[in-house]
Image (spheres, rainbow, N blue to C red):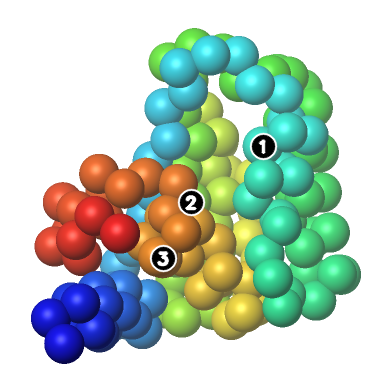
Amino acid sequence: SLQSSADSTLKSCTDNILDSTAPKAVLMQFSMTVGPERIAEALSQVKNAAEDVKKKLYDIIVDGMMEEGKMKKREQMTLEWKGRDTIIITVRDKYLGQVQDAVLARGVLELYVGEKTVSPSLRKNLGCGTK
């Protein structure tokens, strides 16, 4: 059927991005004030990742943002993927740390390019459709 064909095209597009060894980064510019705990919670709720790995990501974000506090409007946070298993976290151009875990790295990237994306326009712009 046409629908299942479209679904398989979407899936393979997402998988190609997720499985690629090409450099990947997400730059988040905040449109409102958000606390470090809320950001860390949202990014560390990856299914299948080990609890200690999720806690490490959470702690890097919360501890790293402690000094300057909440993200304010127009401030930026960057997540950069190194290879298939490492996420590097930068806030306000300051390196906070990195987590090396393939399941976590894939899960966080899926937040942005997976089928249940937080940014449908990003998926569409990457040629992955609107689903």
Residue marked by disc 2: 79
- Does the residue at mark 2 contact the one at mark 3 (Cβ under 8 Å)? no
Q: Secondary structure at mark 2?
A: strand
**Labels 3, 1: front one:** 3
Q: Which image quadrant for residue 119? A: top left
In x, y percent, where is residue 78? Answer: 46, 43
Is residue 117 depicted above or below 7 in this figure? above
Query: How far apart in space, not on screen, are marks 3 and 1 (Cα)?
Result: 19 Å
Q: Nearer the viewer, residue 9 or 49?
A: 9
Residue at image position (40%, 65%) is 115
Q: From the viewer's perspective, tell me whether residue 84 is left or right of residue 47.
A: left
> Which residue is tagged 3?
114
Q: Secondary structure at mark 3?
A: loop
The structure residue drawn at horizontal position 59% and vertical position 81%, both measured from the top left corner, is: 102
For the N terminus, give its image quadrant.
bottom left
The amino acid on which the numbered mark 3 sits, given as a three-letter code, is Gly
Q: Nearer the viewer, residue 31 or 115?
A: 115
**Residue occupied by mark 1:** 39
Q: Residues within 10 Å of mark 1 (few under 14, many from 20)?
A: some
